[in-house]
Amino acid sequence: MKKFLSSLFILTLLCFSCLPCWAFVAGTALYGSTEGRVNRIRIPLTATATGGTPNFTSYALSPTAYTNIQLKYGITGWYLYEVEIDPGTTGPTNGAWDLDITDANGYVISTTSLDNLSSTDTDIYRWAESSTGYPQIWGTWTISIGDNAVNNASVTVYLTFVSN
């Protein structure tokens, strides 16, 4: 068993070291509920540029991927409440990189609010102040990073959704 796990670990390292792109990896979603019956889920996504390039692959966020006993239909129809952006030790291009969130119809939800981000500061964005209110997830969203020129950069994005 130990030899198998060692081989699996080495194979995984080899696979990831050969990828010349960013890869979004979804972490464990944290589900919670408050006394006021507002259900909340925080979904961490980590993107890392590998293979010595600044390029990346977009992440498809499906609302039905988060189904369980509490969330029979996943997060379909939930509202995007907050986006937290935490650049890694080697952050993307300072003041130039963008985080784009696009809905199933191709509408860019993040507009310009997530453009020209810092390579070191953790930023938190909410849409409550906008005239359109909070965006709802009804289909698969695309999460992507653009305008980065830093090789091997990394960033973690936390998407917080609420049910009502």
Image (tube, helix red, strand yellow):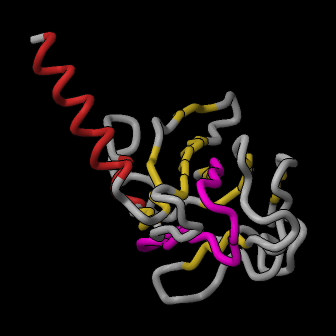
Instruction: Return the x and y of residue 128 as percentages of the image width and height.
Output: 84, 64
| The quadrant where residue 130 appears | bottom right
Q: Compared to 148, does 42 lie above or below? A: above
- Vertical arrangement, residue 31 with respect to residue 62, above or below: above
- Residue 116 falls in image quadrant: bottom right
Task: Find residue 126 and report its horizontal and vertical position in percent.
Answer: 81, 59
* In the image: residue 92, left or right of residue 61: right
Q: Position of residue 146 (x, y in %)?
A: 65, 76
Q: Which residues are magenta?
A: 136-156
The residue drawn where x is 78% and y is 70% is: 114
In the orientation shown, which residue stands out farthest toward the top? 2
State left or right for residue 57 relative to residue 117.
left
In this orientation, which residue lies closer to the viewer: 50 or 84? 50
Q: What is the residue that sits farthest to the bottom in this orientation? A: 106
* Image x and y of residue 35, in percent: 68, 28
Residue 27 appears in the rendering: yes
Is 45 placed left or right of 72 in the picture? Answer: right
Q: Which residue is found at the position 58% from the left and 52% from the top?
A: 163
Q: Could one spot residue 82 in this view of the protein?
A: no
In the image, what residue occupies the spot 54% across and 68% down? 143
Quadrant of image for the N terminus? top left
Name the residue located 59 percent from the left edge and 42 percent from the top edge.
42
Does residue 139 show up magenta in the picture?
A: yes
